[in-house]
Every structure is written in C-alpha cells, then in structure tokens.
Image (cartoon, rainbow, N blue to C red):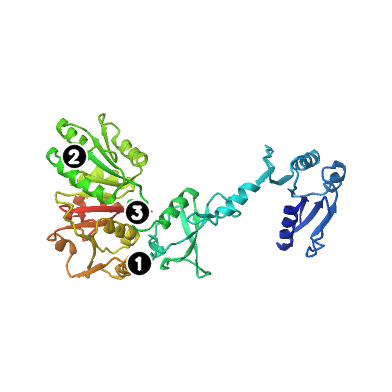
Amino acid sequence: MKKILIISDGETAEHFINRVVDAYTSENIYYVVQTKQKKFPNANPSRFKFYEFDPTSLYKLANLLKMDFVQVIIVMDNPLDVENTILNIRSIKKNLRIIILNKWKLKNEDPNIVLINSKEILSSRLLDYLPNVPVIAQNVGIGEGEIMEVLVPFGSSFVYKHIGVIEQKEWRIVAIYRNRKLIMPNRRRMIQPNDLLVLVGEPAVLRSVYRAIKRELGQFPEPFGSNIYIYLDMDLIKYKQVAKFIERAIFAHEKFGHTLIIKIVNPSDIETLWRVKEYRSDNVIIDINYESKNLRESFFNDIKIYHVGLVIVSNEMFKNYKMRNILYEAHVPVLKIAEKKLSSVKDASIILGDNRDLEKISSTIFDISQKMNLNIELYNYMNEPQDAKEMVIEHYYNLSTIFSKTIKVLKESENPIKKLKYKEDFIQILPFNKKLTQKTIYSLLSTDSERLYHKLDGNHQIFIPIQI
C-alpha cells in the first residue's frame, strides 16, 4: 500500500480531492491535510485519512511525516504557505518527491520537486478547442506531443487511403474513431472523412503528419514545401537549350505560383547568364554559384533555406546518374522538362504498377492536375497481376468523386509505354522511388513500367516522392 500525502487549501484543492476520491485504486492510501476541514462523503475511510491543521507549523507536520510517504502533493492558495510547507518537509525528508500546483512563478532547483504550471495547463486545454490545431495528450507518455489526435477533413489528402499504403516512419496510426466508435486499424482499413485518428510517434514527425492530413486540394507544392526551384547545371545542359528550358519552367511556375528560385551552377557562358538575369523580379530570385564547390551540400541547403516544394530540371540533368540520386535524396517532387511545349499538355498519364505507390501520391496527382487543368488517365496493363491495381483504381475513383474530377481507366493488352510513345500533349506522373535511381542500362530487360520511365523521356515527367 503506497502512502500519499496531500496538503490542501482552497477550492482547487477541494476539486482535486473529489477527483481523487472518484479515481478508484486499491493500492494507494491518502493522508489529507486541510487548513479548514471539508467533508467528502464518498471518501472510503480505509483509503482516506483527514487531518485539520496548519502545514506551515513544523511541529504538527513533523508528527505526520514520521510515516513513509512515496510523495507529497501540495495544492494551496497562498505562495508563502507553499514555500514554508516545502521548508518544513525538507527539514525532515530530504529526498521526498513533492508535486506542487504552481499558480504563481515559483522556482525551485530541487530535482525531487515538480512544479505544475496552472496557467500552462489551462491554456493548453483551451487550445484543444481551437479548430485546425492538433490535440496533444497531456497526461500520457512524456506529454510533449508524442500522442496526438487528428480529425480528417472531407478534402484531406488522407481520405479514402488504405492504411497499408501510408508510409509510417517514426509514427503510427494506432486507433480510429468513427461515429464515436473505436475501430482498430489494419492494412486494408480505409480512412474516411471525419475519422478521428490517434497517432503515436516523434513529436516533430507528428506535426508534419498533422499538416499533411489537414492539407486540402489546391495547395501544391505543399506539404513538400512552398516555393519552385529551377536547378540549372550548365555542365549538363547545352547553352542553346537554356532559353527554351527556362521559358517552359516559367510557365510551370505561373501555374503553381509561389516564389521562383533560379539556381545556376557551373556558370560558363556570359551571354546565357545575362539572359537568365532578365527574369529577375519581385517573385523570381536568381542565385548563381560561381565557386561550383560542394554542389551536393549546397543543393540540400537550398532545399531547406528556400523551403522548396518542387524542383525543375532539364531532361539532360535528370539523365545524369549522380544528379538523379541527389534529387531522390531531397524528397521533393521533381518536374523534368523535355523539348516540347509545356503549355500544350492536356493529360496527366499514369501507368498502374504491381505495387500501390500510386495510392500514396494520389492526392498530389489530383492537386497537380487541378492546378495545370489536366485530365487524369490511368493505364492498366491487363497482362499483369490485378489485385493491387484494383485497390488503387478504387481509391482513385473515390477521390474523383469527392474532388469532382473525372478520371479515365484505360485497359491495355500491351505495355502502355508502347502506346504512350505515340501520344502527344501529355505529362507522365510517377512515384519517385528508389528503383528510379538505378542506372538505366540495368532496366533494359525489365518489364517494370516504372523502371522503364526513360522510354518516355521525350515527354515531360513529374516524379513524386512516396514519403509524407
């Protein structure tokens, strides 16, 4: 039986004792000191012992402290009474754990004294009632945000996704509440609008997940970042192609909005640099790296500093094996521009694979198609296994309903890559997974449409990371 001493005074203390009375446990016995006795009719006499005296009196408190208490809880209205009570306890029990309701600005460096700030508790509780603010568990775990509940809005990027396709690295969906009923999650469970998700994970990761869940259509390039970044390596692109490449990239920027950063590395042609500088304006930043050292580190720093949500590169740059790996490691979408007009693109073409990566990036695909005013076409190669594809198609149909966006599912008897080679005015969208970083020579004998992306590199392509 653990003995706990409660030293109380005032209305807050009375309310606290009532809560303790209602919180049944057979393993604790409570010794309650009151300056003015109040009756608690529901208190079990075998578990609650009440005393009436002034705890600032060392003589009176010393008699009670002859017993072995595991901790003391002090809830009082007067700060001087609190400080004197602490002195009395410490004169007898040097290491006894003391929990204090701190209504003022009391400070104490004693490692066995815990100060509970009442103003922080009240403000935190009121914060839970604000819309679009994550609700964090205060009294579970370490109370720093590692447990969070999030309401899934109707237009969320998570709506109608199967839990099994959501990348959950350093976080987990541990419970779903739907219509006030608990539903245990599993890989095939589909998230629906107005579901309340309980998440567990690293606090910083959960804050990012919260923003991703609350993100609605029309926010691209969020949640990856907010700005557009053109990366122009003049060692990897022909000078004559720079002007048209920038022109097409500017068109994409106009569609997506936000600030545009044009980064030039390995500058080697003065005339080209002057042409690029002509694009400088209030929302276009020209950043030239004349030193051309530590380009990899410089690139990742730019992604962070400029809060980049979309990187635009030329076809030649994406073909470069080292550059492609750097782009993959940045974990932001990449628009690879080909030698065709971007303004004439009408369709977003997606080839269904035998995995469900396309379900992970579905909301981003709908977002891009809306901003660029594109139709969505799903190509289904019927000679491949259909189980995973059917789940992806179901998911896309659900999203097309809630976002009022028409999609086409095209059943193909031959590899869709062959058909798309003869198609004009489309942009291919595909998940940017690890297998795309391999050297293209290793995919020549492959039948995987994702690994064969380079067969369509004469067209514009968007590569979307599968991580949240």
Position of residue 269 relative to residue 360, above or below, is above
Label 2's element? loop
Residue ranking furthest to the front: 282
Would you say residue 373 is visible in this rendering?
A: yes
Q: Residue at x 78, y 56 (%)?
A: 30
x, y percent for residue 88:
80, 40
**Mark 2 vs mark 3: which is more N-terminal?**
3
Q: Residues within 10 Å of mark 2 (few under 14, many from 20)?
A: some
Q: Earlier in the sequence, mark 1 or mark 2?
A: 2
Q: Is residue 54 above or below residue 295?
A: below
Q: Look at mark 3 in the image and give the residue it sits on.
A: 219
Q: How far apart are the two marked residues, 2 and 3, measured between alpha carbons?
A: 32 Å
Q: Residue at x 87, y 42 (%)?
A: 59
Q: Amino acid at mark 1?
A: Ile
Which of the two residues, 14 or 173, is positioned nearer the viewer here?
14
Name the kind of residue labelled 2 in the image.
Leu
Tell me what residue is drawn at x 80 percent, y 59 percent. 48
Judge from the rendering whether residue 29 lies leftward or rightward of residue 382; answer left or right: right
**Which residue is the site of mark 2?**
236
Left or right of 235? Residue 117 is right
Which residue is more in the foreground, 462 or 262? 262
Please give the count of numbered marks on the rendered protein.
Answer: 3
- Cα–Cα gap, marks 1 and 2: 43 Å
**Could you say which disc has been placed on residue 313 in the image?**
none
Amino acid at circle 3: Gln
Above or below for 241 versus 463: above
Q: Position of residue 206 (x, y in %)?
A: 47, 52
The residue under label 1 is 402
Q: Is residue 141 visible?
A: no
The residue at 84%/53% (across/down) is 51
Which callout, 2 or 3, points to the residue nearer the camera?
Answer: 3
Q: Is residue 59 left or right of residue 68?
A: right
